[in-house]
Amino acid sequence: MEMFGRGAALGAGLIALLLVPGGTRTATRSGDGATITGQVKFVGQAPVNPAIDMSEDPDCQAKYQTAPRAELVTVNPNGTLANVLVYVRAGPPADAPYPIPTTPVILNQAGCMFHPHVLAVMVNQPLEIRNSDGLLHNVGGSYLFLGKVNRPFNVSRPGAGTMATHAFSTPEVAVPLDCSVHSWMHAYVSVFAHPFFAVTGTDGTFTLSGLQPGIYIIDTWQEQYGTREITVTVGLGETKTVNIIYGGG
C-alpha cells in the first residue's frame, strides 16, 4: 500500500531568493567562464516525511529495523535542502555546441529505494540503471508519461548485479520514475540540452560553471515546493554567490 503521494502539498510554503550582499566576485584569467554558486537553505520547522510501508514485500521490509521515510523534503543537518534541482532556464546561446558526456549517470535500486532520489542528465547522455538488491525491480512505466515529452520506457531488472542503459531525447524537467513492482519507489530525472545544472546533496550546495558573461534565469525545482526562478548577471570570469531560501510551515 502506498503511504504517501508525490504531489501532496505540505501546506503553504514560502520561498525567498536572495542575492548575497557582497557575494564572491573573483577575477580570473581572460576567457575563463563565469560561475554561479551557492546553497539552498531551509528555514522554519522541517516537515516530517511519512514512513514507508513495505509490508507488501517482506523481503524489502526485512532490510530495515525501522521503516524508512519518503524523501519528499530532505533537510540536511546544516539546515540546507538536498534533492533540489538548480538549472539555467534561459541565458546560454541556443546554438552553442555542448558535448554529450559519455560517462553514464547512475540510478541505483538498493534497499528497495532509488538512489539518488533526484538526478539530472544531458540529452542522449546514458542513464545506467542498476539493481543492487537480490529482488525483481523495474523502472519506468508508460502511465507515468501522460503529458510528458519523452517517450515512455519500462526496463525490468530481475536481480542483484543486473543493469540497463537508457537515454532521453528531449529536454524535460522532473520526469517521474517508478518501480511498478514496489509502489513506494519513486525518483525524478531531469534532462537538459546544456551542462548548466546541479542537484543539491548533503551540504545543500550547487555550482553552475563555465557560463558566458550575461544575464541568466536560474530555476529551482523541489518535489513538494515546485519551481521558482531568480535572475543573475555575471561578468567575464566572475563568481557570484546566491542563497536560495525555502521556508516551511
Image (spheres, rainbow, N blue to C red):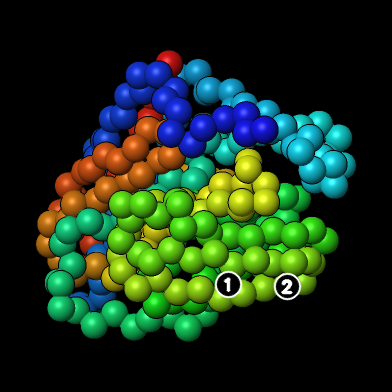
Which residue is labeled 2 in the image? 162
Q: Position of residue 23 (x, y in %)?
A: 27, 46
Q: Is mark 1 in CB contact (under 8 Å) with mark 2?
A: no
> Is residue 108 or residue 246 the one in the foreground?
108
Quadrant in the rendering for residue 151:
bottom left
The correct choice, above or below, for 53 with respect to 153 in the image is above
Quadrant in the rendering for residue 62:
top right
The correct choice, above or below, for 149 with respect to 13 in the image is below
Instruction: Please tell me whether mark 1 or mark 2 is closer to you in this view.
Output: 2
Say the numbered circle drawn on residue 128: 1
The correct choice, above or below, for 159 with respect to 113 in the image is below
Q: Where is residue 247 in the image (x, y as percent from the top left)?
A: 39, 24
In percent of the image, x 35 and y 19: which residue is there? 12
**Could you give the CA–CA distance between mark 1 and mark 2, rounded to whole angstroms?**
10 Å
> Is residue 92 or residue 147 the one in the foreground?
147
Q: Where is residue 184 in the image (x, y as percent from the top left)?
A: 63, 41
The secondary element bearing badge 2 is classed as loop
In percent of the image, x 51 and y 57: which residue is there? 141
